[in-house]
Amino acid sequence: MDLDSWTPDDNARRLATLIATGVGVFAFVALWLGAALNVVLALLAGAGLGVVVWFLVRRLLLSWFRR
């Protein structure tokens, strides 16, 4: 794999996936253990937050990488 051939879209998508996964897992654990929320509701909330963060961060990183 040639890492120099990655487009800005590839970089933004991969970094956004890493960031959104971290935020989603953190939110899941915080809601489940910290807020004593039901595990299923915490999982759904963490996954939903991860999806929202992915869309926002991807758009932000894409505009940043294309400069």
Image: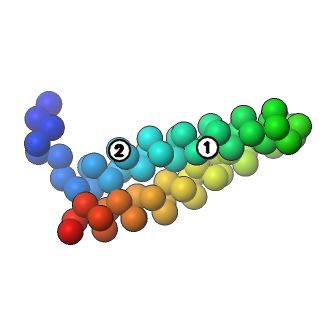
Observer-nearest of 40 and 4:
4
Which residue type does callout 1 highlight?
Answer: Gly
Query: Which mark identifies residue 14?
Result: 2
Within-10-Å neighbours for mark 2: few <14, some 14–19, many 20+: some
Q: Residue 24, labelled with which disc?
A: 1
Q: Residue at x 82, y 37 (%)?
A: 34
Colouring: rainbow
Where is residue 21? Give x, y as percent.
53, 41
In what quadrant of the picture does the N terminus appear?
A: top left
In terms of secondary structure, where does tag 2 sit? helix
Picture quadrant where residue 39 is located: top right
Q: Calculate the distance from the C-alpha at mark 2 to the C-alpha at mark 1.
A: 15 Å
In the picture, residue 37 is in which quadrant?
top right
Asked where in the image residue 44 lies, by quadrant, the reply is top right
| 13, 67: nearer the viewer | 67
The disc placed on residue 52 is none
Q: Is residue 60 above or below residue 49?
A: below
Quick check: can you spot residue 4? yes
Give the structural element (helix, strand or loop) at label 1.
helix
Q: Indicate left or right for 57 with 3 as reference.
A: right
Report the residue at 31% width, 68% height from top: 63
Q: Is residue 21 above or below residue 16?
A: above
